[in-house]
């Protein structure tokens, strides 16, 4: 197993993505002009656009077989054994940070993996395991990963109403600010003051 492999799905709950999505909505609303802010379906569109989506495993999994030395921390050099390993390279599409988030309680046996830009690398190594046992370990890891990503997807989908409400509030707040700015502009212009940008 790679020394850089980390336990997957053991970090923050996936619901931290809700705050990130709200921030993204606020940022987007600040860039919109008055005509676009009046669109009736804008809140739903913004919620859909900001809705977090866990990555999807895509494409064919590649593998690499290797022989390696298995080292127990307290074993003497003469007790080191050689074993067979399988490295599975699982392509995915989407944000890699979802692999660190969890959907509910941490998995009892969290899979370990190395996350690359578009691939998740899983490893199974054992000096005594048969080929069937090594493959079964990889299958178990993949099944846990699929299950966790699907649960994250359900939880993210449940955020839709909250995001639509947040988008509506953001649009309303921006419209209030713009109305206040227009009112101030009218009053100060009536006094004969000139806006600094003119």
Image: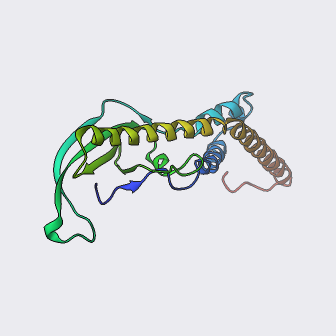
Residue 192, by quadrant, is bottom right
**Horizontal and vertical percent position of residue 65:** 19, 43
Residue shown at 23%/39% (left/top)?
131
Q: Is residue 185 above or below residue 74?
A: above
Question: Measured from the top left, where is residue 123 in percent x and y?
Answer: 29, 48
Q: Relative to the observer, which residue lies in front, 46 or 67?
A: 67
| Relative to 13, 177 lies left or right | right
The quarter of the image holding the N terminus is: bottom left
In the rendered image, residue 139, in percent from the top left (x then y), is placed at: 36, 37
> Is residue 187 placed above or below 134 in the rendered structure?
below
Q: How does the figure colour the protein chain or chains?
A: rainbow
User: On the picture, is 129 further left or further right than 27?
Assistant: left
Residue at figure coordinates x 29%, y 47% from the top left: 124
Quarter of image, res 144: top left
Residue 139: tell me if it is visible.
yes
Q: Is residue 70 left or right of residue 51?
A: left
Residue 94 visible, this angle: no
Q: Quadrant of residue 46?
A: top right
User: Can you say whether 148 is above or below 44 in the image?
Assistant: below
The mark total stands at: 0
Residue reaching furthest left?
78
Residue pictured at 71% horizontal, 34% vertical = 43
Please tell me which residue lies in front, 112 or 41: 112
């Amino acid at each position: 197993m790679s020394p850089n492999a980390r336990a997957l799905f053991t970090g923050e709950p996936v619901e931290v993505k809700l705050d990130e999505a709200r921030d993204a909505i606020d940022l987007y609303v600040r860039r919109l002009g008055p005509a676009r802010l009046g669109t009736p379906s804008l809140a739903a569109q913004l919620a859909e656009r900001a809705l977090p989506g866990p990555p999807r495993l895509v494409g064919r999994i590649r593998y690499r077989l290797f022989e390696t030395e298995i080292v127990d921390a307290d074993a003497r050099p003469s007790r080191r054994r050689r074993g067979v390993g399988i490295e599975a390279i699982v392509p995915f599409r989407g944000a890699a940070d979802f692999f660190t988030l969890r959907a509910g309680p941490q998995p009892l046996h969290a899979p370990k993996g190395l996350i690359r830009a578009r691939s998740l690398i899983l490893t199974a190594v054992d000096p005594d395991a048969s080929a069937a046992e090594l493959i079964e370990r990889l299958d178990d890891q993949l099944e846990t990963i699929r299950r966790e990503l699907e649960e994250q997807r359900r939880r993210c989908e449940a955020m839709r109403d909250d995001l639509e409400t947040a988008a509506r509030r953001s649009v309303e707040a921006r419209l209030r600010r713009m109305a206040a700015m227009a009112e101030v502009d009218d009053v100060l212009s009536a006094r004969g003051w000139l806006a600094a940008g003119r």
